[in-house]
Amino acid sequence: MALILCLETATTNCSVALSKNGVLVALKEDNSANYSHAEKLHVFIEELLKENSIGVSDLDAIAVSKGPGSYTGLRIGVSTAKGLCFSLDLPLIAIPTLTSLAAQVKLEDGMIVPMLDARRMEVYSVILNASLGPVRETRAQILDEHSFGEYLEKAKLVFIGNGVEKFQSICTHPNAKFIEGKLPSAREMCELAEIKYKISDTEDVAYFEPYYLKDFIAG
């Protein structure tokens, strides 16, 4: 049982959620074409707490999307989360960005492939089962018509995220289903953060860093 502030900044969607016992209480987010995290993240946090009559001292933990994703977005989200944890002496919970994205899909069987755009024909992806358990590790991969072939031959795969349009344009396999126009949101972090909180699966605030997956290259 916990009151957790969840921060999602891995893509253009600047998203903040408040969860109680794993259930969404309130959500604020903005998916501007340009990254708005530096301007809006702290504002969203303050507004969310004020509108729900919650003080920072009432929080039990801070959850942050750990990546992969935008270098700048992740850096802003993680630095904000760490600052709150330091100042309030709260535990830090890290949620894999691709897992929370996959949580938007509800399946009884088959697999989920959340994928985020990583420029050109490259994406960040992972393969998860219907219970969000890992089937294949997270990778930065260049897509071609043979990508995910061995998995598509065995089961239905649901692709979701802002990288799906790239693969949809070259994949014609009947077991592939594409969900377009979706980005990670703090909404799906609520239940995942509660699960980690209950088992004290937290991070060392001093040493935690985002999961960039690839080195940052300016320009």
Image (cartoon, helix red, strand yellow):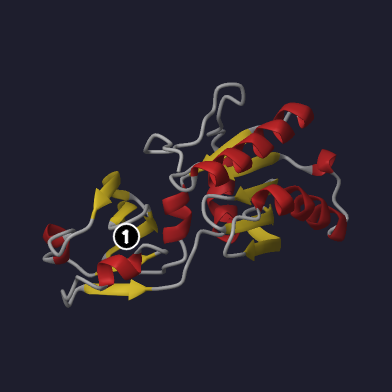
Mark 1: amino acid: Val
Left or right: where does residue 170 sit relative to residue 64? left
Of residue 103 and residue 217, the one placed in the foreground of this image is: 217
Left or right: where does residue 50 sit relative to residue 172? right
Pinpoint residue 46: horizontal percent, then vertical percent. Answer: 82, 51
Q: Which residue is mark 1?
A: 113
Of residue 146 and residue 199, the one placed in the foreground of this image is: 146
The answer, for residue 95, to whether it is visible in the render is yes
Query: Label 1: how many residues lie within 10 Å, few (<14), some (14-19) or many (20+)?
Result: many
- Res 59 → quadrant: top right
Q: Residue furthest front?
A: 219
| Looking at the image, residue 107 lies above or below residue 201 | below
- The image quadrant where one finds the C terminus is top left
Pinpoint residue 207: horizontal percent, then vertical percent. Answer: 55, 22
| Looking at the image, residue 140 lies above or below residue 150 | above
The answer, for residue 108, to whether it is visible in the render is no
Of residue 200 and residue 150, the one placed in the foreground of this image is: 150
> Helix, strand or loop at disc 1?
strand
Rendered residue at 72%/40% (across/down): 60
Rendered residue at 68%/47% (across/down): 38
Pinpoint residue 84: horizontal percent, then vertical percent. Answer: 73, 35
Rendered residue at 38%/38% (across/down): 213
| Looking at the image, residue 126 lies above or below residue 206 | below
Rendered residue at 43%/45% (across/down): 68
Pinpoint residue 125: horizontal percent, then vertical percent. Answer: 32, 52
- Res 152 → quadrant: bottom left
Task: Give the number of marks.
Answer: 1
Left or right: where does residue 44 sit relative to residue 97? right
